[in-house]
Image (cartoon, coloured by chain):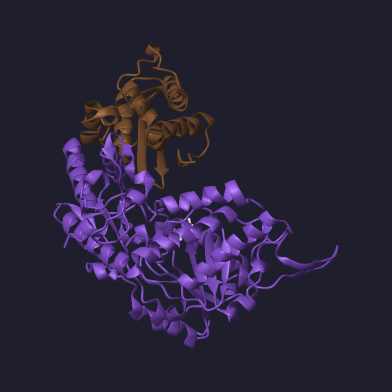
Amino acid sequence: MRSDLHFLKGPAGASACEGQDGDCIRCGAICVERFPVLKRLVNGHRLVYLDSAATAQKPEGVIAAQARYYRRHNANVHRGMHTLASEATDLYETCRRRTARFLGVTRPEQVIMTNGATGALNLAAFGLRHTLNPGDEILLTEMEHHANLVPWIKLARQEGLLLRHIPVTDDGRLDLGALPEMLTDRTRIVSLTHASNVLGTINPVAEIAAAAHKRGAVVIVDAAQSVGHMPVDFDALGVDLLAFSAHKVYGPMGLGFLVGTPEILSRLEPVEFGGEMIETVTLDDATWADVPHRFEAGTPNVAAAAAFPAALDLIEEATLERIRTHEIQLTGYALETLSAFDELTIYGPDDPSQRGGLVSFHDAKIHPHDLAQLLDARGVAVRAGHHCAQPLHRRLGVVATARASFGLYNSHDDIDAMADAIRYAREVFA
Amino acid sequence: MIGEMDELYREVILDHHRAPRGSAVIDTPDLEAEGKNPSCGDELTLKLRLDGDCVVEVSAVTCGCAIATASGSILAELVTGRTLAEVRQLADAFREHMHGDGDELPDELDPGDLDILTSVRRFPARIKCALLPWMTALEAIASHTQDRPVGVSTTEV
Ligand SMILES: Cc1ncc(COP(=O)(O)O)c(C=O)c1O
């Protein structure tokens, strides 16, 4: 059951495998040793990082690649004839190719680099604006992150669109029974999360996409919580556009992706204008560069792009299958551990294999902010709040929850440490 | 308990949290205001009964974290018997203190348990919890003295 003992080496030998030089020879997998921040102490305790859904920690390879970029290659991309400029351009385009391959995308041009999932979702929404008319419907869900709600709210206000939301059932799933009624001939766009950042629920995106396409709607998936945690194949999902952030995939901050079918990308309009995104400019007129460059105005985050492939290396070494199995086991153990506490509500589906690697909960005895603060005193980092999903929390009937979320470096010991810290918090509040 | 947590969740604060003062019902308040920090869910309803300019009864009902609840309770305890001007002076001093770096609240304000709450300053994310009842009180007083409708207070930025 406690497969992480050999999957990953625990920090400070807590769940040590017998690896040398930071690598576990017994399992041949990735060691916690590769994530420098996990060696630090927080409030005198070893850091137990359970907030990977907010941002994942970075492996040494990513940190080194980003530093190497600034030390050796720094130059602007697509703009110079000199050696550094061509190296920088090469690193930047390598990131696009690697990301395309990682998601099973046929052509690298289908990958647009943005500043994050939020940037990607804004580009998707506002880039499709010209295809929308007053009275058109956008179908979202009740479990969306604000990044997949607020752009649509703004667009709906501007264009007179109607927003509809697939409801969430009491056990934290999308109510697909409501889908036939909600998906109408007026539905132009369906945009939904692949895995909920609060409930953990993995949504049947392929099924919903197929139904939406029958109605002629464009389908967008927010894959911020799934990419890097489970196998994600763009073509298999059958969506038109897919958004995610590098920083949640063990990569650097300030980089995200919008992946699209060639067909939709040819219809998407740029939403930012300036250098890099043009073909020809006169004083009064401009034509756009080809896809994807027309969507990448201005100087991009080349350093982040140079570093992201190192994160993909790590994931490919661990393999997504193994990461997924590991996260299911951790989630199952967390569900089991937390359900042993009285007066503690756990949200989302019971079956760990139907969830991403996170568990949100509410302790009737302690406000989530107090709980997170007391857990932090024990070195345990969880997130407390509404996790940028206020409408979902309203649906759950709480203002805030605490959330433990997992990465490939977490172990069963981390969950035990969290449980100990919850007991400590309850003692303080007793 | 250990280290800094000792400071934040001192027994006095936990005591206010467990048994908040000012939880009695006031049916006919002279002043009433609401405070809300939507992101953390702290909510507070503050009601004051006045005799002339003097606060004679306070109800501060908080739904939120221990820091916000304790702060509301301390407010209820401290402002009873003070004039509105004195309450404003204390709330202003507390707000400045929480955003500044002075060591203690001036003794002449008779800050009572509020002095203990100043330890929250070391936890910047929680300052807004501690301030909510006091900002709500300031809004209640301002609307009263300016004779305008009372707004909902927040200490979120
Ligand atoms: C489901 C989901 N969508 C979108 C986002 C936004 O990601 P970012 O803040 O990196 O743009 C997040 C993360 O906060 C998320 O969890």
**Total label count?**
0
Res. A133 visible in picture = no
Image location of residue A287, percent across then percent down: 77, 71
Q: Residue at x 50, y 40 (%)?
A: B149
Residue furthest right as drawn = A283
Q: Judge whether B71 appears above or below A339 on screen.
A: above
Q: Residue A200 versus residue B73: which sits nearer the camera?
A: A200
User: In the drawing, does residue B22 fall left or right of residue B155?
Assistant: left
Q: Judge whether A38 appears above or below A356 on screen.
A: above
Image location of residue A103, percent across then percent down: 46, 72
Q: Quadrant of the C terminus of chain A?
A: top left
Q: Residue A75 versus residue B59: which sits nearer the camera?
A: A75
Image location of residue A63, percent across then percent down: 47, 49
User: In the drawing, does residue A361 fall left or right of residue A60?
Assistant: left
- The part of the image, by quadrant, that contains residue A313 is bottom left
Quarter holding ligand 1 = bottom left
User: In the drawing, does residue A180 fall left or right of residue A41?
Assistant: right
Q: Quadrant of the N terminus of chain A?
A: bottom left
Q: Judge whether B75 appears above or below A184 on screen.
A: above
Colour of chain B as rendered: brown
Q: Residue at x 64, y 78 (%)?
A: A266
- The part of the image, by quadrant, that contains residue A175 is bottom left
Q: Residue A3 versus residue B36: which sits nearer the camera?
A: A3
Colour of chain A as rendered: purple
Q: Judge whether B44 appears above or below A63 on screen.
A: above
Image location of residue B117, percent across then percent down: 33, 26
